[in-house]
Amino acid sequence: MNDPLVRVSKAKKTFEGGLVTALDEVSLEIEAGSFVAITGPSGSGKTTLLNIVGAMDVPDSGEVFIDGELVASGKELDSIRARKIGFVFQMHNLIPVLTARQNVEIPMLPRPLTSAERRTRALQLLDEVKLEKRAESSVLGLSGGERQRVAIARALMNDPELVFCDEPTGNLDTSTGDLIHDLILELNRELGTGFILVTHDQGLASLATRILTMRDGRFEDEQAPA
Ligand SMILES: Nc1ncnc2c1ncn2[C@@H]1O[C@H](COP(=O)(O)OP(=O)(O)O)[C@@H](O)[C@H]1O
Ligand SMILES: [Mg+2]
């Protein structure tokens, strides 16, 4: 049998010198092409889990494997992420002095591409998220929903196998939320891009093939999708 794309074994993460247990020995396997929704109250460990599963951070104890490769320390995390993973952060993490297009191009900078090639790919992605008209606008001038769409385009730049989204429709109006739902489903079904997303949006969670609920740094029993 092939390795799952992600395997987490008894990951534990504490903060504040051990006073706060954000992840309490969590284990998880995710197959390539999955669409997993993670729900749970604020402070239950969802963002910490995404950071660890997505090689943004390492657990205090336990192990994370991505494509069979042990995720262990700083330098390696960058290269694993660059090859396989896209991230849409809860706070967007866009660079305010850059335009939408320049933000989308950031993950491509380490690759040996010409600026024309980067530009073409970035514009294609901005078109997919319906922001082609704002490509050359500073992200400071964009609304919350528009910034979120820039963040999604940026996460897709390197054709990741797996995209992590932390509340991707958190602050969006319904029609923008629907656009993002459609985009995620299309990428998942047509290109086989895997998604792991933290969401309070029941509509979005119901599209997932698997729903995990966190509480106090652990999973509650896994639910079947409605
Ligand atoms: N960098 C940090 N420093 C201190 N405490 C943190 C940090 N990150 C998360 N925590 C704590 O860990 C717990 C889980 O946080 P988080 O994973 O952000 O939860 P969620 O995303 O479900 O709201 C919370 O109690 C939070 O305060
Ligand atoms: Mg969070």
Image: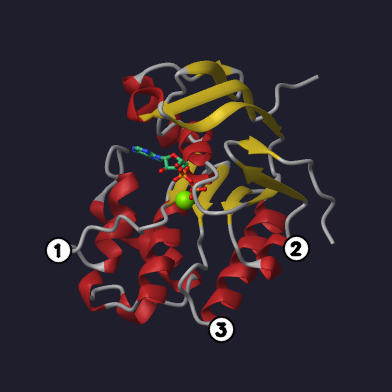
Spatial distance from mark 1 to mark 2, Cα to Cα? 37 Å
**Does any portion of residue 138 appear in the rendered image?**
no
The amino acid beneath tag 3 is Ser
Q: Nearer the viewer, residue 167 or 218?
A: 218
Give the residue number, with chain letter if any, for mark 3.
Answer: 175
Say what secondary structure mark 3 lies in.
helix
The amino acid beneath tag 1 is Val
Sort mark 1 into few (<14), some (14-19) or many (20+) by Cα contacts within 10 Å.
Answer: few
Please determine whether, in this image, residue 134 is positioned above or below residue 120: below
Position of 202 with respect to 45 (left or right) is: right
Sequence-earlier tag: 3 or 2:
3
Please determine whether, in this image, residue 55 is positioned above or below residue 139: above
Give the residue number, with chain letter if any, for mark 1.
Answer: 97
Identify the image quadrant of the C terminus.
Answer: bottom right
Residue behind label 1 places its C-beta within 8 angstroms of ligand 1: no
Q: Nearer the viewer, residue 223 or 63?
A: 223
Q: Which mark is residue 206?
A: 2
The amino acid beneath tag 2 is Ser
Sort mark 3 into few (<14), some (14-19) or many (20+) by Cα contacts within 10 Å.
Answer: few
Spatial distance from mark 3 to mark 1, Cα to Cα? 28 Å
Please determine whether, in this image, residue 134 is positioned above or below residue 217: below
